[in-house]
Image: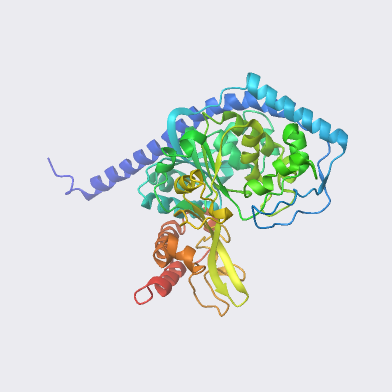
């Protein structure tokens, strides 16, 4: 029999057939996965959606007097919560009744939340220009040694990209999930849901019991799997991370959701319960959640997001920086008296110096395990304790996105192009934070993954159509900043 090697045409034909077989298997296995997981979630949505709509606020939206100021968190600042919304007493009563009805319905007859028991994984939302950013973050995560699977939620089939969802992401143990496939089980239900509300729905419809949610532009510096098997997650079941700001929740929210906790201006109760002195506001680029222990928290957070733009986002933030889903998780857990832990170590901004001062582009969040050890001993650095900080754990490259197709043309101040049009490092200040999370070595590593992404995806993804020389421009930057002689 002639050898395989001696027949190039036969070899090429077999290779082509093999490729087709692999492609077909990948696509059909994805469709099988999608159908299998979607069917259970679709049934849940058919049962849960009526509970949401039956408890609609059915009243006017809160009217803003003005936006709350974004003031840095200071636990010594005992000023009362800002009170900058107007809502007629009848509307407050309507929201209070609707909120109470929803809580009663989910406690008494909530449909079963679908997930695979004893599983854990990563969840993110992406689509369009966020997909290449997610690839960069996911490759950074894999460098930590983590093999946790990821579910990547896309809004609809319009965001589905075959090359990304069938080749690139599966190679990184990530799976695309099309959210509209689930939401379409209830006609027109997705019309109330915009992209900034998708995060909670990704958690709601994830197949994992335990979830680490990461924004597409966030990645860990260490293997995150240890977080699931350590305190505080073992006892709390929900971990959140702080934002820069003091909470700006409207007192009306507490009157609506928890009348016994409603802060009363100039009262003893206000002095005993002032959320603005207890913890920072939340930053939801990273969130750790057990769907088993915090089912009700997740369902109430979904309610807050479902009616977020019209009612609950203004109630929870009053127009301060980042108003949106970020406060809904802690608010839900607090209202339900379910345990959670918010990392106390303050978030830090990283960027570079400019003639005008500082241009931040990235946020650093800290290790909850080490933070919890300190706070259990009463060592609160946020309150002035002079102990070494926890180690940096998450990097959130939030503004602008380091998408290699767009980052070099971002407006001033550009993170990687200085005021004279020259390439520059993005992460140089402040010194203590840069040194703690790896400095130039970590920045070089990140740009190595950006370069890989730029060259591997150029010409293959929709959002880069019409973008020229993505690979060559990124390579030019990498060699200019990190090449030999530039360490």
Q: Position of residue 380 (x, y in %)?
A: 54, 51
Q: Residue furthest bottom?
A: 420
Relative depth, front residue between 145 and 81: 81
Q: Pinpoint residue 246: horizontal percent, then vertical percent.
A: 67, 52
Q: Looking at the image, is 328 positioned above or below residue 448?
A: above
Q: What residue occupies the far top of the structure in this picture?
A: 109
Q: Is residue 470 visible?
A: no
Position of the C terminus, as image quadrant, is bottom left
Question: At 70% across and 44% down in the image, what residue appears?
Answer: 274
Q: Is residue 107 visible?
A: yes
Front-lying residue, 85 or 184: 85
- The foreground one among 272 and 448 is 272
- Image quadrant holding the N terminus, namely top left
* Residue in the picture at 71% in, 51% down: 78
Q: Position of residue 192 (x, y in %)?
A: 70, 38
Q: In the image, 230: left or right of 101? A: left
């Amino acid at each position: 029999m002639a050898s395989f090697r001696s027949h190039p045409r036969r070899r090429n034909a077999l290779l082509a057939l093999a490729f087709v077989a692999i492609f077909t298997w990948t696509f059909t296995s994805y469709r099988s996965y999608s159908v299998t997981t979607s069917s259970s979630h679709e049934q849940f949505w058919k049962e849960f959606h009526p509970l949401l709509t039956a408890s609609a606020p059915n009243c006017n939206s809160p009217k803003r007097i003005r936006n709350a100021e974004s003031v840095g968190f200071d636990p010594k600042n005992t000023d009362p919560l800002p009170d900058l919304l107007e809502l007629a007493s009848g509307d407050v009563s309507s929201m209070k009744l609707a909120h109470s009805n929803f809580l009663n319905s989910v406690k008494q007859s909530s449909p079963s939340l679908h997930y695979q028991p004893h599983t854990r994984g990563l969840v993110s939302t992406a689509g369009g220009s966020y997909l290449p950013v997610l690839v960069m973050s996911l490759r950074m995560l894999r460098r930590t040694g983590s093999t946790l699977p990821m579910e990547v939620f896309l809004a609809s089939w319009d965001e589905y990209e075959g090359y990304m969802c069938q080749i690139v992401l599966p190679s990184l143990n990530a799976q695309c999930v099309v959210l509209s496939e689930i939401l379409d089980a209830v006609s027109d239900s997705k019309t109330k849901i915009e992209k900034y509300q998708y995060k909670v729905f990704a958690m709601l419809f994830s197949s994992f019991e335990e979830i680490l949610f990461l924004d597409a532009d966030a990645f860990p510096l260490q293997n995150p799997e240890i977080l699931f098997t350590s305190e505080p997650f073992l006892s709390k079941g929900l971990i959140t991370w702080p934002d820069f700001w003091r909470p700006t929740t409207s007192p009306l929210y507490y009157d609506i959701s928890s009348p016994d906790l409603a802060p009363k201006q100039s009262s003893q109760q206000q002095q005993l319960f002032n959320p603005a002195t207890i913890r920072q506001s939340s930053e939801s680029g990273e969130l750790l959640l057990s769907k088993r222990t915090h089912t009700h928290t997740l369902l109430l957070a979904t309610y807050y997001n479902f009616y977020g733009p019209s009612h609950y986002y203004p109630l929870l933030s009053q127009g301060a920086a980042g108003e949106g889903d970020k406060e809904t998780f802690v608010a839900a857990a607090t209202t339900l008296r379910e345990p959670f832990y918010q990392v106390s170590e303050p978030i830090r901004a990283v960027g570079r110096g400019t003639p005008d001062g500082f241009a931040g582009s990235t946020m650093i969040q800290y290790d909850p395990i080490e933070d919890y050890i300190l706070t259990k001993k009463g060592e609160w650095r946020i309150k002035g304790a002079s102990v070494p900080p926890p180690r940096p754990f998450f990097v959130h490259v939030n503004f602008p996105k380091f998408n290699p197709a767009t980052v070099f043309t971002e407006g001033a101040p550009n993170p990687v192009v200085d005021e004279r049009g020259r390439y520059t490092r993005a992460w140089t200040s402040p010194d203590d934070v840069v040194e703690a999370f790896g400095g130039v070595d970590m920045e070089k590593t990140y740009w190595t993954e950006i370069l890989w992404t730029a060259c591997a995806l150029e010409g293959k993804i929709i959002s880069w159509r019409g973008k020229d020389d993505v690979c060559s421009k990124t390579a030019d930057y990498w060699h200019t900043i990190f090449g030999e002689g530039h360490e």
